[in-house]
Amino acid sequence: MRTEILSLLRERGDYVSGQELCERFGVSRTAVWKAVEQLKKDGYEIEAVRNRGYLLREEGKPSVFGRTELESRLRETALWAGKPLYYYESLDSTNLQAKRLAEEGTPHGALVVADRQTAGRGRRGRSWSSPAGSNLYFTILLRPKISPDKASMLTLVMALAIAEGISQVCAGSGGDQAESARATAEGGIFQVCAGSQVVQKPGIKWPNDIVLDGRKVCGILTEMSLSVEQDSIQYVVIGAGINVAKQDFPEEMRNRAVSLEEIYGPVGRSRLLVAVMRAFEKNYEEFIGAESLAPLKDRYEALLLNRGRKVQVLDPKGEFEGTALGIRDTGELLVELPEGEVREIYAGEVSVRGIYGYV
Ligand code: BTN
């Protein structure tokens, strides 16, 4: 009931009488009072005034993060992405938990979120630093009815959703305005907004790192399980870690990692996660409808920092350099070699580095 009361108070933005809450949820006044007390303990400021009722005060307050807050915000927006929600104060890894839940039959759209991970996992067997109270660590469980060779595109679908979610919450614009954004040599995108204000927007380093100010702000790890016959997808989990609050990054990452707070000031984790889920849900539907990235390609390429830049392709069969042109509808990066040959680079097989820096 806490979630429902929180949603109603937020939606109303005004006093809601105890009587109305009792009637709406079919509970006693004491039960309402207890739920409100619990919300206060969770960190919400709720004013109780005799003869008027309860008022949620949120403006200028540090944002609350946790199960009730996320559930209440997800109720207001998402259709399926983020439902059901599994929230944990501490977990080994949200990807590992999502896979365990998937094996138990948990449905498409379920979202696993943790405030802290004790065994956060990155790509290529690396670990992902996951301290409490600072960042977003989440994994969505999907059961797409597409052939397994198309699943790697889902990582790009999520990368786009995260970049768009960050733009919306932090830089005050949606992905649709990305066309007017300009990629800079420093590895960022600047958007000129109303009033000539210049706001930095996140870009994407192919296939799925989100970059701000030439440094990584988010990483994505996608894992898939196939049916016994290996010809269809049992489930896919897409996990993402977004650096939100200012923090001391581990030594080896210090020059290559950045947090949203460093660029934009304090950012509410719950609001951001819900914006990402909303963007993901929309992008996913478009992707599934076309079974390709074609409907998302222009928006993805507008944010693609590698585009037009010199890249080094670390192919186990032999490294080479070229200029990144963009992506194919199926997600491969197109790289033009000095002699004019254009090669398709498959994510997962090779890694791509900027010649003059991280991007
Ligand atoms: C990368 O190496 O860039 C990918 C990092 C992915 C980290 C996220 S945090 C949430 C989810 N759970 C994990 O254990 N890893 C992913």
Image (cartoon, grey):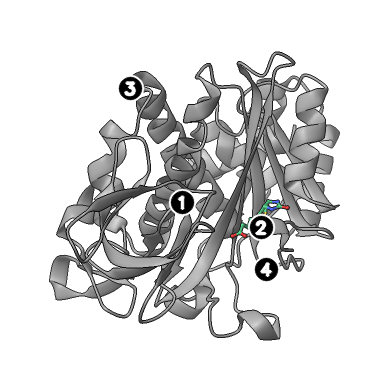
Q: Residue at x 75, y 27 (%)?
A: 102
Separation of marks 3 and 1 at Cα, in angstroms? 21 Å
x and y percent of residue 245 in the render?
60, 72
- Work out whether 173 lies above or below 299: below
The picture quadrant for ligand 1 comes to: bottom right
- What amino acid is at disc 2? Arg
Residue 161 at x, y percent in the picture: 43, 45
Q: Which residue is mark 4?
A: 134
Looking at the image, residue 251 sits to the left or right of residue 10; the answer is: right
The Cα atoms of the two marked residues, 3 and 4, are separated by: 37 Å
- In the rendering, which numbered label is found on residue 172? none
The amino acid type found where label 3 is placed reads Ala
Q: Earlier in the sequence, mark 2 or mark 1?
A: 2
Asked which secondary structure carries label 4, the reply is loop
> In front: mark 2 or mark 4?
2
Disc 3 target residue: 290
In depth, the one of 71 and 35 nearer the eye is: 71
- The residue at the point 22 percent across, 44 percent down is 298
- Look at discs 3 and 1 and give the one toward the viewer: 3
Residue denoted by label 1? 162
Quadrant housing residue 117: bottom right
Q: Residues within 10 Å of mark 3 (few under 14, many from 20)?
A: few
* Front residue (pair 220, 343): 343
Cα–Cα gap, marks 4 and 1: 17 Å
Q: Which mark is residue 124?
A: 2
Residue nearest the viewer, comparing 197 with 238? 238
Task: Determine the secondary structure under disc 3.
Answer: helix
Left or right of 171 on screen, residue 245 = right
Disc 2/disc 4 C-alpha distance (Å): 24 Å
